[in-house]
Image (spheres, grey):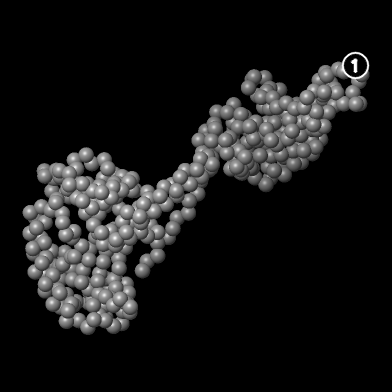
Amino acid sequence: MVTKSIPTKTTGPLHFEDLEPHRFEDLVRRLLYDFRQWRELEATGRTGSDEGFDARGYEAVQGDFGGGIDDDDDDDGSESRTDSDVKDRVWLIQCKREKSIPPKKLAAYLDALPRGQQLYGIIFAAACDFSKAARDAFRTRTQERGFQEAYLWGKGELEDMLYQPKNDDVLFTFFGVSKRIRQRSLSAEVRRKLVVKRKVQRLLQSIGLEVLLRDASDDRYPYADETQREKLRARRWCIYRYEGCHHDGLHVLRHRHLAFIDDDGVAWDFAECMDDSAPHKNPWRTEDDEKLMNQAAAARANAMTIWDALPEKNRAWFEEYLVLPYESVIDIDDKGDEWFEGPHIYVGEFDPVRGPFRDYRRVRLCTIGQWSARHAEANPEARVKKFPRDEALGP
């Protein structure tokens, strides 16, 4: 059996370059709010004459947020900026929304920074990745300029910060992505699946119970469109036998054939001319369906003769199941109606080819022994000829 590879789910890179320059500055400033205890964080870059400051921050190193006076302050109670400057550390924030900044260009940006101001720290943020050479140049230049602290935030650092839970609102504001909202959505989806599963197990307690699957959007029910030859076009509802809840959804019987499994557990065959999966009562059965069932009755009798002649240990059933995802189930009406008295399972819109089911089917090939049942793989290459072939199905 071929094992299917399972793709991993990842989040694509954030497109900082799509942000307007001032919006990129706003983004960086939002990330700065809890970087330090700021007395002020100014959006100086929005004025157009920023003098090298896209943003400027005053870090309150003594925690004096109320503008009050310490014991060491002058007796006149002055609250001038000069007094505040003694306590505050001034940070320069530069933001560049560029696709690439090589080392020389980065060094030129740093050389162009304003001089003559007592700057404590610098944060240089850009919408691109930086090479090792660029980072080395940044460290050297900032040390030469006398910065006590210097941070270079490239695309990787910005993404890391944005994906932290505390910045989820920033991520959503600027990129429309929210891990918190996604988590809530996932939680709601899981809860809904469990609700559907419990309801199915409560209302459909009998394996083999006939149920009606209905497309909730098909308002033609219960009258099929007689102008359409294809069943999925004529009516988007069908009767199936319920076969239980599994990890991937509700399983319903699609085909059931008499079968043979050899003693080696490898060779096998099935009677493709008959099918026991048809519902006992179907008010939408057409004349063509009746003709096919009558033809299949004779084929079934012939296949049963062959099957009865097999040793009991080699008699088997070959069954094929369709898988209805829990998330496709809208609701279940266990009372039915005058057309079909069994449970009605309302589902989302039908796919034009496979209806409401998954794109794969479950196959079961097993002998009839209740206590010593043997399972086999329905490998086409291991199939032998014990039953007549249906020529209409091709080779």
Image quarter in which the N terminus is found: bottom left
Which residue is at 80% across, 26% downward? 117
Assign a secondary structure to mark 1: loop
Q: Quadrant of residue 319?
A: bottom left
As drawn, 112 above or below 262: above
Q: Nearer the viewer, residue 14 or 183?
A: 183
As drawn, 322 above or below 74: below
Q: Nearer the viewer, residue 90 or 166?
A: 166
Q: Nearer the viewer, residue 193 or 357?
A: 193
Q: How would you rate the neighbour count of disc 1 (Cα within 10 Å): few for under 14, some for 14-19, many for 20 or more?
A: few
Which residue was labeled with disc 1? 76
Image side of residue 126 versus residue 254, left or right = right
Q: Looking at numbered disc 1 in the image, what kind of residue is underneath it?
A: Asp
Q: How many marks?
A: 1
As drawn, 83 above or below 231: above
Taking the image as drawn, is residue 279 in sight? Answer: yes
> Where is residue 196 shown, x and y percent of the image?
37, 50
Image side of residue 170 versus residue 236, left or right = right
